[in-house]
Amino acid sequence: MKKREEEKAYLESYNESDYVKPSVAVDILVLTIDNNLLKAVAVRRDEMPFKDMWALPGVFVGINETLDEAALRGIKEETGMDEIYMEQLYTWSDINRDPRMRVISVSYIALINSKQIQLKAGKRVSDASLIPVYDLLSNTEEMAFDHAKILQYGVERIRNKVEYTQIAFELLEEKFTLPELQRVYEIILGKSLYKANFRKKVKDLIEETGDIQAGVANRPSKYYRLKEKMEVSL
Amino acid sequence: MKKREEEKAYLESYNESDYVKPSVAVDILVLTIDNNLLKAVAVRRDEMPFKDMWALPGVFVGINETLDEAALRGIKEETGMDEIYMEQLYTWSDINRDPRMRVISVSYIALINSKQIQLKAGKRVSDASLIPVYDLLSNTEEMAFDHAKILQYGVERIRNKVEYTQIAFELLEEKFTLPELQRVYEIILGKSLYKANFRKKVKDLIEETGDIQAGVANRPSKYYRLKEKMEVSL
DNA sequence: ATAATAGTGTCTATGAGACAGTATAGC
DNA sequence: GCTATACTGTCTCATAGACACTATTAT
């Protein structure tokens, strides 16, 4: 019974193209920490619909491309970056999320170090910029499509994951000081942490590199690196 | 630059249909507890590819249907159930996950009480059955498509979520005893728990209904119900 | 009384949070 | 010396885990 319908749908869409398919896109929330703020890569739209509003970078998924590949392609187009941390967030499918046509969007989140980012910026209003996340979240009516939802979902996800994974390290360079690391946690969580407790929490994850900070007018901090990548699922 | 390509892709797929789109399907992992085992609804395929292997219930997503709607439709077709707990899992996109054509699959997990399930079963080999999850997980080569991955991913997700959400209650009826509830946790987690500690953990979530078990050859247990649904994100 | 399962009290180890203290650079 | 920031020791409290104990039904 049900089985029959399934095969029928398969065959329909296979033999003839009279089965109307939605388009599939990938939208990427690229987050970074810049100037002590959590920021997202956003593009100001210069055409309808949602003209002049902020959109997340997105691409359509090619017929011979996986979602991960499409997401990487989108990130590279927008930031020039290649080797980055990335994970799938959620798939959005409201019928009219794009008023022009039916588009199902698989969202991704990517974390990058702002020092390495190369925004394709400056030439047109619509090129990519780094926008503080909290500005966007408090002006969701200025965001195109359902991208405010994606942003909200993504920010909540890293707030959770920063507590039990090592994603925070993706926002720093390979060598970092503990005050820097702590600042990353504080920016993501939106609250200040006790130094001593924070250090207890991360001490098993990191190791000293040997070098220390130089040229600061106070006690210099030691540099650390991540000891090893831990496997964490979900 | 990037912007141009995006608009172009939109227009191409909008005006003419020369942009080849993948198909989008929903595959659903329906879990239940039956006879003290965690079981999944599975369908034995009676056609190629993957003939005679176990597949999860799935449907194609209609052009005017959200993913949630498609998942609900699939669940209802297979189990007859309507009001159930369901959440999106992950979206799978390997190029050849379906050898016949390009299909992107959005997976869902659903939890239902086995007492209410009405499998459309018995008529054909390919109708739905309840299969112990651990049998499937230890014979992944008997599963069609990438459905073993979905199963693995889904089981891991509820193992995590059972600890900090109330999903376990979805597998029971409205009234339940604490030994029953504990058994649900133990079956999902795959280990036994200390009674006293377990009760401390859940005591704020539940309230007594007033009635107690009858006709058992030992001290009867009290019946409880879930106090209120808690909001938990992600 | 016995068997069988329901239900409780309490000790301990662990970890989060709070706070006070010491250390080391430039000036 | 002073200022500024790095870094550490320790107390308290909440929670998870382990285990021993008591309670109530049918037979």
Image (cartoon, coloured by chain):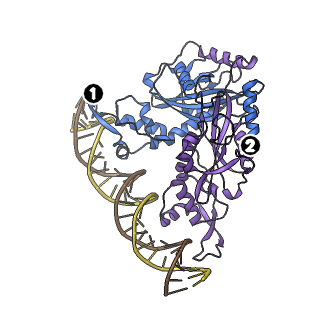
Chain colours: A blue, B purple, C brown, D yellow
Question: Which image quadrant: the C terminus of chain B?
Answer: top right
Q: Is residue B13 left or right of residue B168?
A: right
Q: Look at mark 2 in the image and give the residue it sits on.
A: B73
Q: Look at mark 1 in the image and give the residue it sits on.
A: A214
Q: Contact (CB < 8 A) between labels 1 and 2?
A: no
Residue B68 figure quarter: top right
Residue A46 visible in the snapshot:
no
Give x and y (percent) for residue A145. 67, 29
Pointer 1 indicates a residue of which chain?
A
| Amino acid bearing label 2 | Arg
Give x and y (percent) for residue B136. 57, 47
In the rendered structure, find residue B99 and report the number of the disc placed on it. Answer: none
| Crowding at mark 1 (Cα within 10 Å: few <14, some 14-19, many 20+) | few
Residue A66 figure quarter: top right
Give x and y (percent) for residue A118. 48, 19
Residue at 58% over, 62% down: B181
Against B129, is B100 above or below? above
Number of labels in the image equals 2
